[in-house]
């Protein structure tokens, strides 16, 4: 048993049966000493912008910050590979004393001349905020000299949380949107926001919309191209998957160009079907779009239903914990697990807001622990208390699960198989089945005790 830090007590609640929806504290700085699972502002900006494949990405700061590269959060490209390079100004002691603006400008001119990118994103790190380099001024000068957009991303790590990094990234993207030619964009055009193509999901989703008869102008930012981003204002609708990262940009585009947006999810049968229908119903002037969508959903569900039933037979009654970056993904995961016969015992997020947590309470079962901005000690305690069989999270949660002898599924940065769309539902169900049903867990000490199995220690 552990006691919560006093500053954390209002960020954890247990859903009570037939009790009114309770408020949970959120949207606040991490409590000192809690060892938050959150990342910094710089990290938030990088995960949003890094998948722009034909842009130059330059970290202005010490070399350590440049360790956060494409390899930390994979994103596939169907063409350019420039985004897979990590460039840094590698600020040293004398740069900190005298400033790094000249070094940044020289580096940009050299890199742009060599790589010929369509645009450049310059990320400010903590040290840049402390010494006061005018990154925006450097970007303007380099843009005038080179003729390409050079965009400063004000992502000093100490300015807030990962969510503030999302906002900085959206502000940089908004400077590109509206600068391209939209004359060849048809009347049934959409943008996909908040899809980062970690394992090819963007290609799957774009194909669904193609089969429905809709054109995708831009995917922001998975497998993105600068020219597509510049003409994204020609779309008629924005569909926002990762609401935490891209809602700011959707609101900017609604304000500046009158493009409405809808929050959707492409994870799980229920949510991907709803996302496709949302888009189809937005264009009632062409009834054929809705008809093609109905045929698509019917065919895809019929194809995967037998496989899901096979996995479900082994998963009924199993319990899971979920801890993800954005809470909108958690909604989908709860519904997916329920479809597979599993219970969600613990659920939390790093960046959820009050409305997100109200919705979580509405769809969770009584007794579920709901947590905002948790830490490893809390997560471990809740997993043990609920005796969960599976932990769904990201790279930072994997060690927690394995140390406790709990199956783990990565639903974040490091996965190599697509989990979105109907095919993604099968991939995820297969991974959950393989993780939960593996016989190896009977040898984990706590499982062995529960099953009354003797597990002698290996010889020294």
Image (spheres, rainbow, N blue to C red):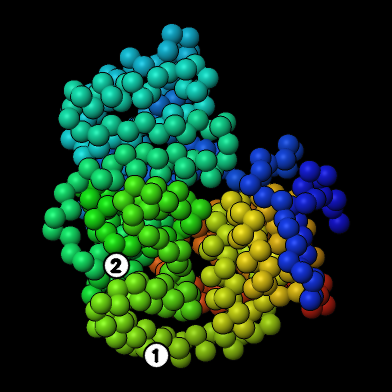
Which of the marked residues, 1 or 2, is nearer the chain's N terminus? 2
How many circles with numbers are drawn on the protein?
2
Left or right, 345 with respect to 203, comes to right
Q: Where residue 302 sits in the image (x, y, percent)?
A: 39, 90
Query: Crowding at label 2, few (<14), some or many (≥20) Cα neighbours within 10 Å?
Result: some
State the image coordinates of residue 393 (x, y, percent, origin top left). 58, 59
> Toward the viewer: 101 or 246?
246
Query: Is 401 on the left-hand or right-hand side of 134?
Result: right
Secondary structure at numbered mark 2:
helix
Between 218 and 223, which is closer to the camera in this rendering? 218
**Whether residue 319 is situated above or below residue 1 in the rendered picture:** below
Rendered view: 122 above or below 177: above
Residue that appears at 36% across and 31% down:
152
Q: Which of marks 1 and 2 is in front?
A: 2
Residue 460 visible at all: no
Q: In which quarter of the image is the N terminus?
A: bottom right
The answer to which of 171 and 55 lies nearer the viewer is: 171
Outermost residue toward the left in this view: 184
Location of the C terminus by quadrant is bottom right
Asked if residue 22 can be seen in this view, the reply is: yes
Residue drawn where x is 72% and y is 56% of the image: 24
The residue identified by callout 1 is 302
Quarter of image, res 160: top right
Residue 406 point in image, percent of width and height: 67, 66
Q: Quadrant of residue 29?
A: top right
Q: Which residue is tagged 2?
A: 206
User: Residue drawn at (53%, 45%), measured in percent from left and top?
Assistant: 163
In terms of image quadrants, where is residue 207? bottom left
- Badge 1 element: helix
Residue 129, percent across and down?
A: 50, 23
Q: Residues within 10 Å of mark 1 (few under 14, many from 20)?
A: few
Residue at point 64%, 66% (across, down):
360
């Amino acid at each position: 048993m552990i006691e919560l830090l006093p500053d954390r007590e209002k960020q954890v609640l247990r859903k009570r049966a037939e009790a009114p929806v309770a408020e949970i504290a959120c949207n606040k700085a991490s409590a000192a000493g809690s060892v938050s699972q959150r990342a910094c502002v710089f990290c938030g900006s990088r995960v949003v912008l890094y998948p722009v494949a034909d842009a130059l990405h330059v970290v202005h700061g010490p070399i350590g910050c440049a360790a956060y590269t494409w390899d930390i959060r994979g994103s596939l490209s169907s063409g350019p590979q420039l985004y897979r390079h990590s460039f840094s100004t590698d600020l040293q002691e004398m740069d900190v004393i005298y400033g790094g603006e000249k070094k940044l400008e020289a580096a940009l001119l050299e890199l742009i001349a060599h790589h010929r990118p369509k645009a450049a994103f310059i990320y400010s790190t903590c040290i840049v905020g402390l010494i006061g380099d005018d990154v925006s001024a450097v970007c303007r000068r380099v843009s005038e000299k080179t003729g390409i957009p050079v965009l400063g991303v004000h992502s000093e790590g100490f300015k807030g949380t990962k969510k503030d990094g999302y906002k900085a990234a959206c502000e940089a993207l908004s400077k590109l949107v509206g600068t391209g030619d939209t004359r060849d964009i048809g009347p049934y055009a959409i943008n996909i926001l908040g899809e980062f193509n970690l394992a090819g999901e963007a290609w799957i989703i774009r194909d669904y919309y193609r089969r429905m008869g809709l054109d995708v102008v831009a995917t922001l930012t998975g497998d993105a191209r600068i020219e597509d981003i510049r003409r994204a204002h020609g779309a008629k609708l924005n569909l926002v998957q990762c609401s935490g990262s891209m809602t700011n940009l959707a609101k900017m585009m609604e304000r500046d160009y009158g493009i409405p947006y809808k929050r959707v999810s492409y994870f799980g049968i229920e949510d991907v079907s709803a996302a496709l229908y949302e888009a189809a119903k937005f264009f009632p002037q062409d009834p054929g779009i809705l008809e093609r969508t109905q045929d698509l959903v019917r065919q895809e569900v019929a194809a995967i239903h037998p496989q899901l039933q096979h996995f479900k037979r082994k998963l009924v009654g199993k319990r899971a914990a979920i801890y993800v970056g954005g809470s909108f993904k958690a909604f989908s995961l709860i519904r997916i697990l329920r479809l597979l016969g599993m219970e969600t015992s613990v659920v939390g997020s790093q960046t959820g807001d009050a409305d997100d947590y109200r919705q979580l309470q509405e769809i969770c079962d009584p007794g579920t622990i709901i947590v905002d901005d948790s830490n490893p000690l809390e997560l471990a305690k809740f997993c043990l208390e609920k005796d969960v069989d599976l932990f769904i999270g990201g790279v930072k949660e994997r060690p927690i699960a394995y140390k406790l002898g709990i199956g783990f599924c990565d639903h974040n940065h490091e996965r190599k198989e697509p989990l979105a769309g109907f095919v993604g539902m099968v991939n995820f169900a297969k991974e959950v089945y393989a993780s939960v049903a593996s016989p190896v867990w009977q040898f984990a000490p706590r499982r062995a005790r529960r099953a009354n199995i003797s597990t002698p220690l290996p010889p020294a």
